Amino acid sequence: MSVVSLANVSLEYPIFNSGSRSLQIHLYKALGGHIAVHDHKLVVEALRDVTLELEDGDRLGIVGHNGAGKTSLLRVLSGVYTPTSGSARVDGAVSSLTDITLGMDLEANGWDNIVFRSVFLGLTFREARRKAPEIGAFTELGDFLNLPIRTYSAGMFLRLAFAISTSVNADVIIMDEMIGAGDASFVEKAQKRIEELLGTTRVVVLASHNLAILSQIANKVLWLEKGCVRMLGPTQDVLGAYMASVAHA
Amino acid sequence: MTRRERDLRADRTCRLPGPRPERTASRRLGGPGTEWDCMKFSEISRNATSELRATAERWRMIHLMGSAELRRRYARSRLGQFWLTLSTAVFVLALGTFWAQVVKLPLETMIPHLAIGQILWTFLSTSVLESTSAFQSYSWVLQNQYTPNGVVISSVVYRNILSFIYNSTVIVAIIAFFGLFSMSGVLTFLLLFLLTCVFLSASCFIVAIICVRFRDVIQIVATLMTALFFFTPIFWKQQLLPAELQWIVRINPFAIVIQVLRAPLMGQPITAADLAAFLALVLLSAAAAFLLVGRLRHRIIFWV
């Protein structure tokens, strides 16, 4: 049975201007007043009729220009957005790694942040504390873990966030661009860890502009254009067609 | 959009959900039917209940988000939150003593009356005011992973309950000093406080939803709260109000809540009218929030 299944998913959301944001103007219009405000309620169709089935072991890459609906689709998959029509179903636990620092507290120290971030990823306090030593060791931050993370350099902070976020056990992992910890000495270690994580996860969905990474990881690629599925198929076919179209444009 | 187009649209979005997914571990992320015009009560109630359950399941997140402010205060100063409690204590004692002279009431009634009233008012009004921008200020979590809206509201209320617990040390000191302490009074208070939290969470949810959709309501609520303060018996007592103005206390929800919570702590009886109004408030706000949340739970994220 498929792990992720989207059937004819469409997503429309309203874009507000100052007029439609105002209760006063709404009331005034309801009372029959005329107001010289351009108040066309703008509805953006972020996704249209997207159908998608992902099974155990699938690694889906998503490509498309800015505004093609990549982020919207990721948000539908993670449950942030509910489709306006059609249905979306995901079996199992979803981890959305679109912001790997979510839940971290600058005033708290490294160890506490391991617990905080893990709880945001869905662990209990006890589970989080049990995992903390392994995560702490991986970061190689040593005694810095006893200091508030506001004292960390950007690289250290990212390294901690990365180590915690990649310790999750989820059935489905969703990423907007590949996550990593940029630090040169750390890059190889981080690479290995993310490969391990992606290897044990049932389904991975990755939206990216980096086609090299996609062709390494993905077995399927979805090409979105203006919210519609332009192409969905094996990685090389879709990436080839996508690159050809980019080159033409 | 013409009438016909709208009908067609409603028709499309109103399609009944297909066969229910198997019960196992599957999670329905959504489905058709989020339009206002075409939502059945059963669906609203299913939505609201599942929002409530999803919120309760995430109590750990609520605890972390709600206590962040408290941790921040303790990170920089050893007294942390107690600084605020200390300033509350100074404020209510100084003003209580002064005000008792102005209105010519004995200290032992004026100080507890003012202190309990003021601390409860801070608790209620800060919660409501913070909820006017709750969804906006927690957009970072709402947009990055599925988070029930209730988690945001609960965090706001929980944060204010924590502050209230700190401030209640002032109340405890004052009722002990004036010899007003009674076990039954405190127990009654705790029971009514729980109901107040229901009322407050429901009201905050409603306020937050309206304010995230209509941004000009944020200022309206702020103005309204300032005005309501003067219509709430904190610096004055209900008995001092002329008969033709008594209705002010009857229709002001904050006045009702404060009267009902304060009376048992001061060893006074709660009037039947106050209690009935209080229970009605709790029920009405809970019902209204239930309907609103059931209707709009999936729309809120688009307004953030």
Image: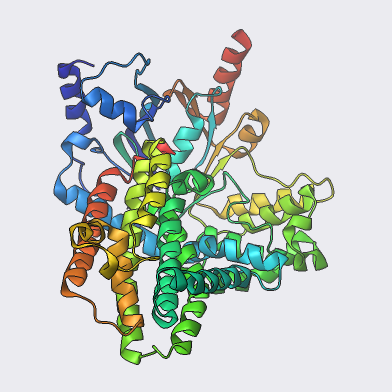
Please report the residue visible at 17 percent of the width from the left and 28 percent of the height from the top.
B11
Which of the 4 image quadrants contains residue B223? top left
| Residue A238 or residue A19, whichever sits in front | A19
Q: Looking at the picture, how far across and down is residue B266, in whole percent?
A: 35, 82
- Left or right, B43 with reference to B63: left
Q: Is residue B28 visible?
A: no
Q: Looking at the picture, how far across and down is residue B284, in whole percent?
A: 20, 58
Q: Is residue B288 visible?
A: yes
Q: Please identify the quadrant where the N terminus of chain B is shown.
A: top left
Check the image and report above or below for B129 versus B181: above
Check the image and report above or below for B14 versus B209: above
Check the image and report above or below for A54 versus A146: above
Q: Looking at the picture, how far across and down is residue A234, in whole percent?
A: 51, 30
- Left or right, B109 with reference to A244: left
Please report the residue visible at 71 percent of the width from the left and 68 percent of the height from the top.
B77
- Left or right, B277 with reference to B263: left
| Residue A225 or residue B156, whichever sits in front | B156
Please report the residue visible at 26 percent of the width from the left and 70 percent of the height from the top.
B239
